[in-house]
Amino acid sequence: MTALNRANIEVLAQLKQLVTCCQSIYSRSTGSSVAGIGEHVRHVLDHYRAFKAGMLSDCIDYNYRTRNGAEETDPLIALQHIDALIEWLAGNALMPAHIEVISEINLQHSESESMISTPARELLYLINHSIHHMAYAALLAKTKGTTVPAHIGWAPSTASHQRSTQEDHSDASN
C-alpha cells in the first residue's frame, strides 16, 4: 500500500469520526443555501467513488454525483460507504501510470475539461478536497452546538506546524 493510500485511509477515518459525532444533526438543514453535514459527506464520497470507478475505466469523471443519495440523510449508510472505500484503498496498490480526468469548469453553461493526470496526483487532490469539506462540516456542527474533535478538517501541514510549535515550546522550557 502506498503512502497516499494510507493518507487517504486516515482522511476517511476522520470522515467516519465526523459522521459519528454528528449523527444527531447529520441531516439537519442549515437554514441557508449552505450544504449540511450529510451533503458535505456525500460530496466527499462522490469524489472517492469517481476515483475508484476511474481506476477501472481509465477515466476519473468528477462530474459524477449521487445528489440526494441515502448517505446525505442516513449516517449509518454513510459509514458503510466509508468503510467500503477504506477497504478498497487498503487492498488496491496497483494503479495505472496515467489516467484521464474530467471535470466541469464553467458556471454559465455545461463545459468540461479533460486532461491527463496520475492516480497519485488525484489521491493527493482527494486528501485536500476532503479536508476542505470536513472543515466546513465541522464548523457547521460547532454552530449547532456539537463537539467535534479538534483535528477534524486540519490539513497535514497544520498538524505539522502544531507539532513543531509544541516541540519549540517544550525545548524552551528545558
Image: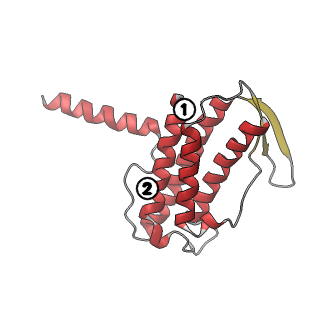
Relative to residue 84, is residue 141 drawn left or right? left
Q: What kind of element bears circle 1?
A: helix
The colour scheme applied to this rendered structure is secondary structure
Q: Which three-letter amino acid code belongs to the residue tagged 1?
A: Leu
Mark 2, secondary structure of its residue? helix
Q: Residue 41 in the image: state x and y as whole percent.
A: 58, 58
58 over 105 or under it: above or below: above
| Residue 70 rendering spot, x and y as whole percentages | 64, 67
Q: Amino acid at mark 2?
A: Gln
The residue pinned by badge 1 equals: 4
The crowd level at tag 1 (other Cα within 10 Å; few <14, some 14-19, many 20+) is: some
- Specify which label sits upstream in the sequence, 1 or 2: 1
Identify the residue under disc 2.
17
Where the C terminus falls, by quadrant? Answer: top left
Give the side of residue 68 with respect to residue 155, left or right. right
Mark 2 surroundings: few (<14), some (14-19) or many (≥20) residues within 10 A: some
* Residue shown at the point (62%, 53%) measured from the top left: 45
- Residue 153: in sight, yes or no? no
